[in-house]
Image (spheres, rainbow, N blue to C red):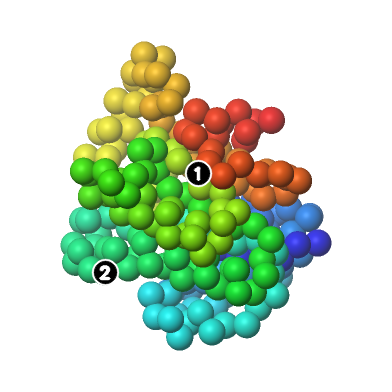
Amino acid sequence: MKTAVILGGSGLVGSFLLDALLEDERIGEVHSFARTALDQENAKLSQHLGDLTNTDFWNLKLKADLLFVCIGTTKSKTPDPDLYFKIDHDIPVLAAEWAAKNGLSRFLLVSSLGADPGARNSYLRIKGKMERDVRAAFPDTVAFRPSMILGPRKESRFLESIGKGLFKALGPLIPKAYQGVEAEDIARAMLRISMADKAPELVPSEDIRPIAKA
């Protein structure tokens, strides 16, 4: 059986992925790296709490096979641009360096459609830089690039909820590459690819649902 590590297990995608990992008989242990404890208990689950932006946290010694990064924030939740960059960029990069140092076999992360280090949009630019620097640390990284992520969030985001409503209403008219993707499908696709013999470098938005349903 494999040992999995997850970052962002309390988030929209991460919560679905955490449940899937705990239910999967091929996974013997699940380790959550987070700032605060998850509101969940399971014999397979171990929680490691600390400041993931601090390099000292990553001195943690742990034998594992898979690492899933579903971590991220928003400008409204994290208005400080320096802290925002540390969460969306630095944490995944530190995780990739840790995974390479500790000999993990696969590193999978949630990025975004349009991620590009040269993008004019700051969100896409940070995601692009994150992907670039993660891959420099762990070359075989699998990056998932969903469009709008759909699903029930714990916190209310008014403008985002309007956008999701439009995505669902206009779904058939939107090109597949830009259609919204259910968070549960992203989680299922991540787990499926983590167990595959071969994995792609990038998983575009339109491929996520077919992989999840395969």
- Per the image, label 2 sits on a secondary structure element best described as helix
- Residue 135 in the image: state x and y as whole percent: 50, 56
Q: Quadrant of the C terminus?
A: top right
- Residue 148 in the image: state x and y as whole percent: 37, 36
Badge 2 is on which residue?
83
Mark 1 vs mark 2, CA separation in Å: 23 Å
Q: Residue drawn 37% across and 18% down?
A: 174
Q: Residue drawn 43% across and 53% down?
A: 131
Specify the label residue 198 is tagged with.
none
Q: Residue drawn 49% across and 60% down?
A: 136
- Residue 181 in the image: state x and y as whole percent: 46, 34
Q: Residues within 10 Å of mark 2 (few under 14, many from 20)?
A: some
Badge 1 is on which residue?
144
Residue type at mark 2? Leu
Residue 188 appearing in the image: no
- Per the image, label 1 sits on a secondary structure element best described as strand
Query: Above or below — where is 5 with respect to 212?
Result: below
